[in-house]
Image (spheres, grey):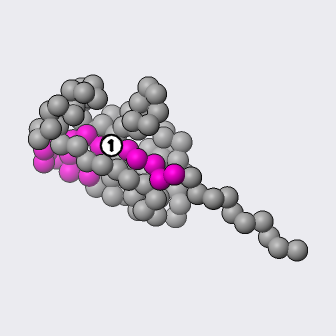
Amino acid sequence: MTAPSPPAPGPIPLLRLYVAGQTPGARRALEGRQRLIDAMAGQIVIEIVDILSDRTAAETAGILATPTLSDESSRPPRRLIGDLTDVDQVLGFFGLTRRI
C-alpha cells in the first residue's frame, strides 16, 4: 500500500508592500518582507511599491498609510498596515501557513 501523495501546491500568493522611501519604517517593512518570503520557502511573491516614486499606484490602490501589505487578489483587498515582525501572525492574517 502506498502513502497518499501530498496535495498539489496552490498558486503562489502575490502581495504588494507599499513603503515610503528609505525611512526606518520602510526598512523594517522590507526586512519583514524577507522574513515572510523565507518562512514561505520562496513560495510567495511580495512586490515592493515605493509610493514616493509611484504616487499613482498608491492613489489607485487607495493606500493612506505605510507600510501596508496588501493582497489585491481578494475583494475587497485584505490589507495589513504597520508592523510585519510577527511572521506567523502576518501569514495567518492572509490565510497562509509557514512552509519551513
Q: Is residue 19 magenta?
A: yes
Query: What residue is pinned by disc 1?
Result: 16
Q: Nearer the viewer, residue 57 or 34?
A: 57
Give the residue drawn at x 51%, y 51%.
Answer: 11
What residue lies at 34% left-to-right and 40% top-to-bottom?
A: 69
Residue 95 visible to the viewer:
yes
Image quarter where the N terminus lies is bottom right
Nearest the eye: 2 or 79: 2
Residue type pointed to by label 1: Arg
Vertical position of residue 80 compared to residue 97: above or below: above
In the displayed structure, 41 sits above or below 65; it is: below
Seen as rendered, the residue at the extreme right is 1
- Decide: few, some or many residues near mark 1? Use Cα within 10 Å; few <14, some 14-19, many ≥20: some
Specify start and end residues of the magenta stretch as a single range. Answer: 11-30
- Secondary element under disc 1, as helix, strand or loop, is strand
Q: Is residue 17 above or below residue 40?
A: above
- Residue at 28% x, 29% y: name it: 61
